[in-house]
Image (cartoon, helix red, strand yellow):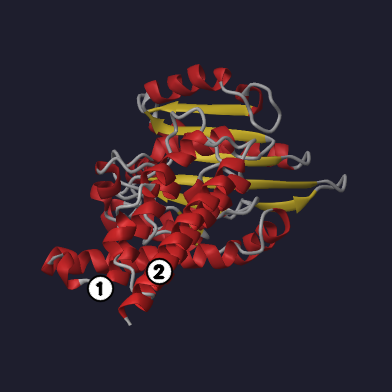
Amino acid sequence: MITGQRILDTFFPMLKGGKAAVPGPFGAGKTIVQQQIARWANADIVLYVGCGERGNELVEILQSFPELIDPYSGRSLMERTFLVANTSNMPVVAREASIYVGVSMAEYYRDQGYDVVMVADSTSRWAEALREVAGRLGQMPVEEGYPAYLASRLAAFYERAGSVETLAGKPGSVSLIGAVSPPGGDFSEPVTSHTKEIIRTFWALSKPLADARHYPAVSWLESFTDYSARAAQWWAENVSPKWSSRRQQALALLAEADELERIVNLVGPEALSSSQRWVLESAGLIKEAVLQQSALDPVDSYCSPQKQFQLLDLVLKFHDGGSHLIELGVPVEQLIELEFSGALKRLKSTVTNDDLTPLAEFEEKFEKVFSAIRIEHQGDREAVS
């Protein structure tokens, strides 16, 4: 399933008929992430269930979606979108029912051979309604007051996702994406922990990233997907066979940079070697040039799979070229002072999905500069010897 969001498609992909969760504390951007998925997912029908949401958020969807154009059909996004509106001032029983109304509608269109994406915002408020109804019925509460059947109800909901072949022989699918709002961002609370055991794609939102204005604030350290092996087949056939190796290299770089940042915070950057400093610089480029994506940018709001891969491949080629120069003895300060970093970060907003030639031209530019630095350094070494 293509959402047009680089950190979701490239790093933590989801398949049609799959199930995913978007957990995150208040202010981390759950609603924006889900709205972006609803806007740009390559599905025939999108169902947006506002379960206990604020009324102004649903009004925003009603106002913005008719003005947006579906990149796949060229028509208004509202033509393929259904809204199940259950605002926070509606009865609790209606909130509990809203999720089931949405998934029943999704199955109705799936059985007609459509690919349906259902976005539920949020399952935490649905679970709170479940808790309140269970309390009124006098049922025994367990952890944090939720009823004992919370896990089974969540599983019964998410297990309705899947791909089928209809009686007419057409393929159809229901993909379920649920937002989770853990109090205080505690992922160990019951709704998040039970959901994590059920779903196969986990897009964990980070409050520190959101506070740093890094959007979408999906944590590359806490998120995971079980669909990467299947997704690799699609990427190899449609974009590039190098997708899997490049993805693993980028995730390894980000994990290594996280460890190095802890060392820097303790003892300062002087404790790092030149290669480690270059890893930090390259990880920063991945974060800003690839992972950051503005929902309000007319160019960058939706990113095609081809542009996603070429942006990532370009940043990693830049990293590989710099690493080779550092191995030859080139000072890391000389590489950091090059003017390519800023231009590399701006490419995502200047290069359109229809014309990717500027990415190849940029690669030629920095390869020429790296080649010149290598020749100059080798000449200096020969002169010294």
Residue at image position (33%, 43%) is: 214
- Point out the frontmost of discs 2 and 1: 2
* Distance from Cα at disc 2 to Cα at disc 1: 14 Å
Q: Which mark is residue 273?
A: 1
Residue located beneath label 2 in the image? 325
Residue 154 x, y percent position in the rendering: 48, 53
Looking at the rendered structure, the kind of residue marked 1 is: Ser
Q: Nearer the viewer, residue 209 or 305?
A: 305
Looking at the rendered structure, the kind of residue marked 2 is: Leu
Q: Is residue 365 visible?
A: yes
Residue 160 x, y percent position in the rendering: 61, 51
Q: Earlier in the sequence, mark 2 or mark 1?
A: 1
Q: Which mark is residue 212?
A: none
Q: Nearer the viewer, residue 10 or 334?
A: 334
Residue at image position (64%, 39%) is: 106
Residue at image position (83%, 46%) is: 170
| Quadrant in the picture for the C terminus | bottom left
